[in-house]
Amino acid sequence: MKQKKKIHFAWWVLLGLSIMIGLARGGINNAGGLFLTPVTQDLGIEMGTLTLYFSISSIVTMIFLPIAGKMMAKYDIRSLLIGGIILQAGSFAMFGLMNSVWGWYIFSIPMAVGSIFVNQMAGPVLINNWFKKHNGLALGIMMAAVGAFGAVIQPLAGNLIASQGWRYTYLILGIAVIVVVIPVVLLLIRMAPQQKGLLPYGMTVSDSNDDKKEEHTEDINKGVTFAIAKKSYAFYALFLFFFFVTAIGSFAQHIAPFAMGIGYDIKFAGSVMGAFMVGMLVGALAFGFLTDKIGSKNTALFAMIVGLVSMVMLLTAADHPTMFTLAIGIFGFITASIGTLTPLLTTELFGIKEYSQIFATAALGLAIAGIVALPGYGFVYQFTGSYTYVLWSIIAMLIINIVLILVAFKGKKKLEKEGLWN
């Protein structure tokens, strides 16, 4: 009876992931956009020139992703994550000491390497290892934590920039994240249930029934091999979906410059980013719940349609503070789909037989999108003085993604018919 009442360690791993990714992604990654306008104004740098550091980060991510996948299989996960958070948050703090755009270009390299382990790989891989049931809910909770932490940290960062300056804010955020995350990783993170003598959450095996044990082992290894997956059009549709959904989400880094470009101040931009993070929180929970109920395909289609609503609102009512805040909150809602739906779509399309390799390769689409979209939006603003063309391009990408989702699931049916999904 005692063991039944005991909280499964999978939930402690989820708590650790939620704190780590909540601070690193909600606190550091998503705060980056708040600094763009103050830094460009203070140092006399053009917006497009500064945002090239996002592109450098994305190139590093694209090159290092496959290496990171192999390292996670080979080395202790806690050592990798501690090294990762020092690289990511430490580099972010160093931005506060820079006087030239080259500082952002140089430190974006170690920042990207650390972020791959902490923000991109750890969550999906560990949740797949630890959760047989409620996989979608677990990912939703983790991404909701990004929204929850961000909803607090973004307005705080906006106020700190206004009162103490961007340099101090970079330093305090970076150092604080390192100090909190390292103990969390040491106490709560483990790579696999076997390290604690456990089975994944939701898997029950009778001690006396070896056949049942084998049956469950087969069940959790179902799916498509990487060799087969990469030859299917389902994989290429997923890759392109990753690309476009990340390009759409990349606009988050430009919300603050967009707001300030149409007359709002840095404090309002910070509060709007808070609304964005609340939207992410709600979206992450909703997508996790909906995926468990109606599947990742229908949830992804719903997310793209909601995204269209937010873009239309920004195009027609951006000069109204309440409508602007609501539209950004809705945009935050669908941006949660990057962290929640991309791994869930990968699992539903290809299973978990060789999930890490398939996800890491498809995730190159995320990196390529960052190379193109993040500085691209900056240059559009630099040359036109407006984000209007960016908003229209996001509408086009949302529509393309609806088509890609349908194509990917047709591809899955083809794999199943050919007997390759087993």
Image: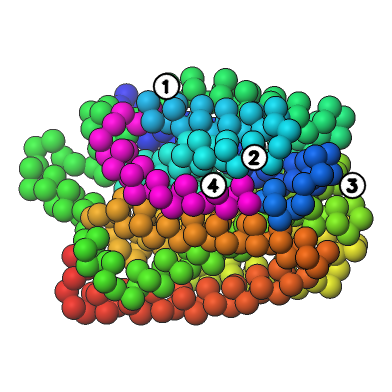
Q: Which residue is mark 3?
A: 265
Count neighbours of disc 3 (C-alpha within 10 A) and say few if under 14, some if 14 to 19, many if 20 or more: some
SS at mark 1 in the image? helix
**Which disc, if any, is residue 186?**
1
**Which disc, if any, is residue 102?**
2
**Which disc, if any, is residue 57?**
4
- Rendered position, 172 above or below 247: above
**Which disc, if any, is residue 85?**
none
Residue type at numbered disc 2: Trp
Residue type at numbered disc 3: Asp
Characterize the magenta stretch by its predominant secondary structure: helix
Residue 38: percent from the left, percent from the top?
81, 41
Dot in front, 3 or 4: 4
Instruction: Looking at the image, tell me whether mark 3 or mark 4 is earlier in sequence order.
Output: 4
Q: Residue at x 32, y 58 (%)?
A: 358
Question: Which contiguous range is marked in magenta?
Answer: 52-78
SS at mark 4 in the image? helix
**For this rendering, which residue is in front, 267 or 14?**
267
